[in-house]
Structures are given as C-alpha cells and as structure tokens.
Amino acid sequence: MDKHQHEGTPHGPGAPMPCRALFERLSEYVDGELPEELCHHIREHLDGCGPCVAFAHTLKKTADLCRRLPAASMPPEVAADFQRFLTACLSQRKAP
Amino acid sequence: MPAPPPDDQALIAASQRGDAAALDALARTHQARVYGFAMRMCRNAEDAKDILQDTFLGMVRSIRDFRAESAFSTWLFRIASNACLKKRRRGVHDPTPAQELSLDALMPRPDADGRPPEIPDWSEDAERALLRGELGGKLEAAIDLLPREYRIVLLLRDVEGLSAEETAEALDLSVAAVKSRLHRARVFVRRELAGYFQDTGRPPAARG
C-alpha cells in the first residue's frame, strides 16, 4: 500500500487503481465474484504492490481458516434435554 | 444392511404432511449445526439451548410454509438467526454492542513519516499454526470480538458456507449489504490474527 496510492491517487501509467479502491473490493476478488475487467485492474495493481499482495494473501487465508473451523460439538446432556423438549413439543402438536 | 436414512427432501415432505417422526428426524439431522451456530453467536450455553429450542419450535410451527426454492438449511438459519438476534436484544449484557466497522479505520495506514505500512504475509505461518492446533482458539476469539451484525454474516458465509445470496435471504439483507459486512468482518478478523503473529513473531511452538 504505497504512500501515494493510499489515499486514492493514481501512481503511474498502467496502474490506475489506488490501494484504497482495491482494498474495498478485495473480499469479492478473493471470492471470485468480480467481473474480469476489474480483476485485470486488480492483478495489475498487485503486480507492483507488495503490501497489497500480502494483505490479499492473508485476507484469503482468514476466510479459508474460518471455513475450516471444526463443527462445534453438542454436549450429550444438551442433546438429551433437546430430545425431551422435542418429544414434548411434538406430542402437544395438533394433528394437521 | 439397513436402509439408508431418508434424506432431507423426504423428511421435509413427510413433515409437511404432519408426520411427527419425520419432524423429529429432521430436527436431529440439523440440531448440532444449529447449536454450534448459536454457541458461536452468543457464547453462552444456556442462550444457545434456548436458541436451539426456539429454532425448532419455529420449524415445527412453520414447516408447511417452507418452499423448495430455498435450501432447507437457509430457511432454518433464517429462523435460527432471528432467534439469535432476538436473544441478544433481550440480553442484559452484550459484550459486543452494535457498531459500524469503518473500512478506513481498518485499512493499514502509512506510518507518521509516510512510509507504506509493513504488511507481513503470515499465511504460511497460519497454516502451520492451524495444523499444530494453535490457531483455532485465536480465530474463535477474534470472531467473538466482532459486533454481532458482522459476526452473524461471517458465521453464515465463511463458517457455515452459505452463499452471499443465501445469507442475504436468511438475514433479510441485500446481497450488497452481505458482501459489505462480510468484507469488514474478514478485515477485522484478519487484523486480530495479524496482531497475534506480530506479537509472537512466530507462532509459539515455532519459537526457540
């Protein structure tokens, strides 16, 4: 995230996208949700901006780590309580 | 060999006809996922139990309104999300009150001398720390710090794996709002994890 690019100032020919504009769309970029033209501008920016590359990698890794969080376990006593609740709830239910 | 259990579609159809055994089986199929989501939303076992019960009470009451154009899990998360948000509104203590996460505040800034921010790429360190079982707690703690409007979006999108469209449907938000909240939530959690790697230099087990 270059000093000049940071506030949104273009920093040279061929790389018109400032860090701030890229930063705003980075989740959509790593999720593959952006149109190809915009992806092209982002790749162009990333080619010359080490801090943005590191940010993009670690943002993608953050989403990836969330996806790999283990399923939270349900303690057996909670499952037993819930089963009692469900049985009571279904037995009181009116027939359709 | 016993017959395979009926899939959701058959259970839903039977539940909609009023079959109590099918409703029971449907609830058992999804109970752990809903409980896990509720625990991550409220971090309180009693609240999570209440949310689990409220969700399935809602399911039993309105199963006949379920239409196959939505995924069943999206429909169920919509009920569970409402139960979570209602629960937090009633709660006496909320450690993460509603607040806006500003992208400008979250974006790394140049230092006082105008030098570009140093942004280490710790993605490989994170992978190793995860494999050693060191990162899960840090990640859960970082998610806990999110304001709930952002936490619920990150949980549905990145932890539960709903699409942006399904998350929007579950939370009654626009897809654009889901994407905006998800991005802020990820940037926030990334910053917390970056702090962990910065504080430790390297993950604890890799040091020394």
Image (cartoon, coloured by chain):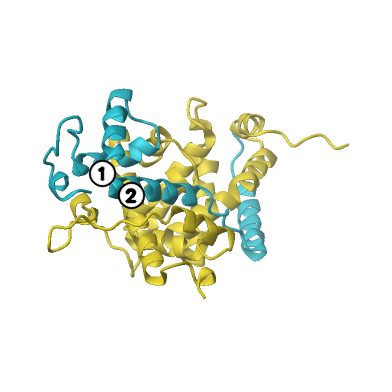
Chain colours: A cyan, B yellow
Position of residue B107 in the picture relative to residue B136 (left or right) = left
Of residue B113 and residue A61, the one placed in the foreground of this image is B113
Position of residue A8 in the picture relative to residue B143 (left or right) = left
Residue at the location (28% across, 24% down)? A37
State the image coordinates of residue B200 (x, y, percent, origin top left).
42, 71
Residue B172 appears in view = no
Using the image, determine if residue B69 lies above or below residue A22: above
Question: Mark 2 and 1 residues: CB-CB less than 8 Å, in contact?
Answer: yes
Residue type highlighted by circle 2: Phe
The crowd level at tag 2 (other Cα within 10 Å; few <14, some 14-19, many 20+) is many
Residue at the location (31% across, 56% down)? B119
Of residue A12 and residue A9, the one placed in the foreground of this image is A12
Of residue A42 and residue B4, the one placed in the foreground of this image is A42
State the image coordinates of residue B188 (x, y, percent, origin top left).
32, 56
The residue that mark 2 highlights is: A55
Residue type highlighted by circle 1: Phe
Residue A54 appears in view = yes
The residue that mark 1 highlights is: A23
